[in-house]
Image: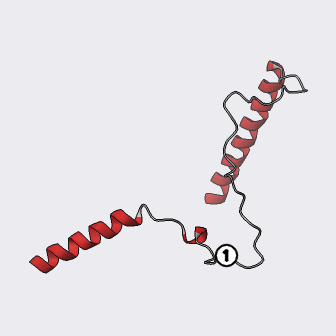
Amino acid sequence: MKRLLAAGALLASAIAVSGCSTSIADLPGVGVPADAPARPKEAGGYLPVHDMPPDREEAPMKPAEQAKIEAELLAARERQATAAQKAGK
C-alpha cells in the first residue's frame, strides 16, 4: 500500500513539475537544425489595442447588393440540398 501511495505521489509531482518546464526547442543546441534561422530576441506579440486598421477605400456594400448576394447564396444552398437528396435516393 505504501509503494502504491509513493508511486502516486511521485507521478503527481512529476505531472505538476512538467507543466512548468521549458520547451526542448528553447534549450541551446537541442532540437534545432544547424541551418535554422535564429529566433528573434522579442516575441512577435499582438498589436496594441489602440492601433486601428486604416479606413477602407471602398464604400460598404449597399443593402440592395447584400440582399442580392444573400438570395444567390440561398438559391445555391437549395440547389445543393436538392442534388444531395437526388444522389441519396
Residue 10 image offset from top left, x and y in percent: 25, 73
Q: Residue 84 location, x and y as percent? A: 66, 53
Disc 1 residue type (three-letter) = Val
The image quadrant that residue 18 belongs to is bottom left
| 28 to the left or right of 20 | right
Q: Is residue 73 above or below residue 50?
A: below
Q: Residue furthest top?
A: 63
Q: Work out which quarter of the rendered image holds the C terminus and state it.
A: bottom right
Q: How is the image coloured?
A: secondary structure
The quarter of the picture where residue 86 lies is bottom right
Other residues around mark 1 within 10 Å, as few (<14) / some (14–19) / many (≥20): some
Q: Is residue 26 left or right of residue 14?
A: right
Residue at 77%, 68% in the rendered image: 37
* Residue at the (75%, 42%) spot, across then down: 76
Disc tally is 1
Identify the residue position indicated by label 1 in the image: 32
Task: Tell me if 41 is positioned left or right of 26 in this view.
Answer: right
- Residue drawn where x is 34% and y is 66% of the image: 15
> Can the viewer see residue 89 in this picture?
no
Left or right relative to 66: residue 45 = left
Q: Nearer the viewer, residue 10 or 41?
A: 41
**Tag 1, which secondary structure?**
loop
Q: Residue at x 64, y 78 (%)?
A: 29
Q: Position of residue 12 (x, y in %)?
A: 27, 67
- Relative to the observer, which residue lies in front, 87 or 77? 77
| Residue 47 visible at all | yes
Q: Nearer the viewer, residue 12 or 60?
A: 12
Residue situated furthest left in the rendering: 1
- Quadrant for the N terminus in the image: bottom left
Q: Is residue 38 above or below residue 85?
A: below
